[in-house]
Amino acid sequence: LLLDTYITALLEFEDYELETSRKIKENKNKTLEVEINFFSASDSFKAKFTLYKNKQGELKIINIIIDGINLGLTIYKFQDNLKNENYDLDKAIETWKPLYID
């Protein structure tokens, strides 16, 4: 659901062009990576989508990285923080610390 929300927000940008990489990378675990560039006259950013193909042959998004921000990892870490705060959403938000990776 959260990934659907991010995708919808990305698609609502007006006057953006999309450019996809012709190269689709298949990983050892059979996931696919597709890079997409969003650009306009005044701005641009890159996104990498990780997908898998289900038994029905449909592609499903399992992660998105936007300008280096790994949404899947961020969601996972926040869920972990929420659990540590006994599912108290206000406390989880209050104690949330960004994850820095060097």
Image (cartoon, helix red, strand yellow):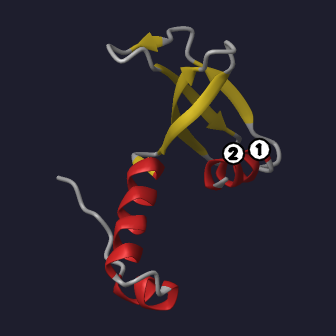
Name the one closer to the observer, 30 or 8: 30
- Res 92 → quadrant: bottom left
- For badge 1, the amino acid type reads Leu
* Mark sitting on residue 33: none
The front one of 6 and 76 is 76
Estimate the x, y position of residue 13 in percent, counting from the top left.
77, 50
Q: Residue at x 70, y 48 (%)?
A: 4
Q: What is the secondary structure assignment of the residue under circle 1?
A: helix
Which residue is rendered at x = 28% and y = 64% of the image? 99
**Badge 1 density bin: few <14, some 14–19, many ≥20, Cα 10 Å:** few
Three-letter code, disc 2: Ile
Q: Secondary structure at mark 2?
A: helix
- Is 29 left or right of 61, judged from the image as shown? left
Q: Residue beneath label 1, please?
A: 11
Q: Nearer the viewer, residue 2 or 42?
A: 2
Which residue matches tag 2?
A: 7
Which residue is pictured at 24% across the width and 61% down the height?
100
- Horizontal arrangement in the rendering, residue 69 relative to residue 46 (left or right): left
> Which numbered disc, 2 or 1, marks the residue closer to the eye?
2
The span from disc 2 to disc 1 (Cα, nearest Å) is 6 Å
